[in-house]
Amino acid sequence: MFQGVYTAVITPFRNGKIDYDSYFKIIENQIQSGVAGVVPCGTTGESPTLDHNEHKELIQKTVSLVAKRIQVLAGTGSNSTAEAIELTESACADGVDGILSVNPYYNKPTQEGMYQHFSKIADVSSKPVMLYNIPGRTNVNLLPETVKRLSEHKNITAIKEATGDLGQMAKVISLCRANFHLLSGDDNLTLPVLSIGGKGVVSVVSNLFPRACVDMVSLYLRGDLVASQKIYYKLLPVFINAFIETNPIPIKAAMSWFGYCANELRLPMTPISTGAPADQFKKIVFGLKEEGIV
């Protein structure tokens, strides 16, 4: 169901409000670049700072603009199961193609708590659900044995894995059914994840370089490892430097440098710090743009 490049799309702001003019241009660029789908209202989209009306409106407008040209995988996660269910039901009613649901954060639930949380969400979802395991943000790790249990639910079809642990990812792939897909949640691990049987990436960097990310994954899945590796190593400095500060601070700065949006974030997120790391990142992305890596 989920394979290829899915862009965890940023949410542009201007004067404190969602900048839909910029957002629509970003989405159109994603579509024209051939991504498999976009993910509105994820962490990269600063979803924790969106109120419920904004969250629902952003998903509605994304579905309307995309008009089935690519997939829309809506971020509807929450540390409250009831809230995640509400957001999931709303997104499904609006016509999304899938749901991305992150580990409950702050609560630090047990494995059984996470199993029940995700099962309840999948029970009400009319669309396929992709789990999202990112212990660095949530402080809980969805273990392979729990993923296996969840993969037996007919509506849970994939996982975005951002543990950085290839051994754990390989175990997930080995335990789960053949048509349960694992996608990388870390740009810099995209090729390693593909090499162990992953099916793609939910990417931050594809906000900026969507075509290159699509080509990298597509070439690998077609069996052209050498050509895929060439793009990967070109993009690797971006993959690394896109996380010199907390995501989405660096990628939103880079999008502003390329003229996609204003470099405006909502507190407690702040614009990228001035200094050598940001200057180096800017030099890298403009260098690649000049080479035609877009």
Image (cartoon, grey):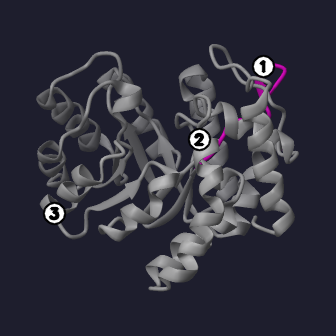
- Which residue lies under the disc numbered 3? 174
Point out the tag, 3 or 2, that comes first from the N-terminus.
2
- Which residue lies under the disc numbered 1? 16
Which amino acid lies under the numbered mark 3 shown in the image of this protein? Ser
Q: Secondary structure at mark 3?
A: helix
Q: Secondary structure at mark 2?
A: helix
Which segment is the magenta one? 8-21
Observer able to see residue 47: yes
272 or 112: nearer the viewer: 272
- Which residue lies under the disc numbered 2? 59
Which amino acid lies under the numbered mark 1 shown in the image of this protein? Gly
Quote the CA–CA distance across marks 1 and 3: 46 Å
Q: Are marks 2 and 1 in contact (CB under 8 Å)?
A: no
Quote the CA–CA distance across marks 3 and 2: 34 Å
Give me the residue at 59% from left, 20% from top.
49
Point out the tag, 2 or 1, that comes first from the N-terminus.
1
Counting from the top left corner in percent of width and height, residue 262 is at 84, 33
Quarter of the image holding residue 138? Answer: top left
Counting from the top left corner in percent of width and height, residue 126 is at 34, 50
The residue mark sitting in front, 2 or 1, is 1
Sort mark 1 into few (<14), some (14-19) or many (20+) by Cα contacts within 10 Å. Answer: few
Instruction: Residue 81: say if magenta.
Output: no
The N terminus, quarter of image: bottom left
Q: Secondary structure at mark 1?
A: loop
Counting from the top left corner in percent of width and height, residue 25 is at 80, 51
Give me the residue at 27% from left, 43% from top.
122
Give me the residue at 41% from left, 46% from top.
99
Q: Is residue 237 above or below residue 214?
A: above
275 or 178: nearer the viewer: 275
Counting from the top left corner in percent of width and height, residue 266 is at 69, 19
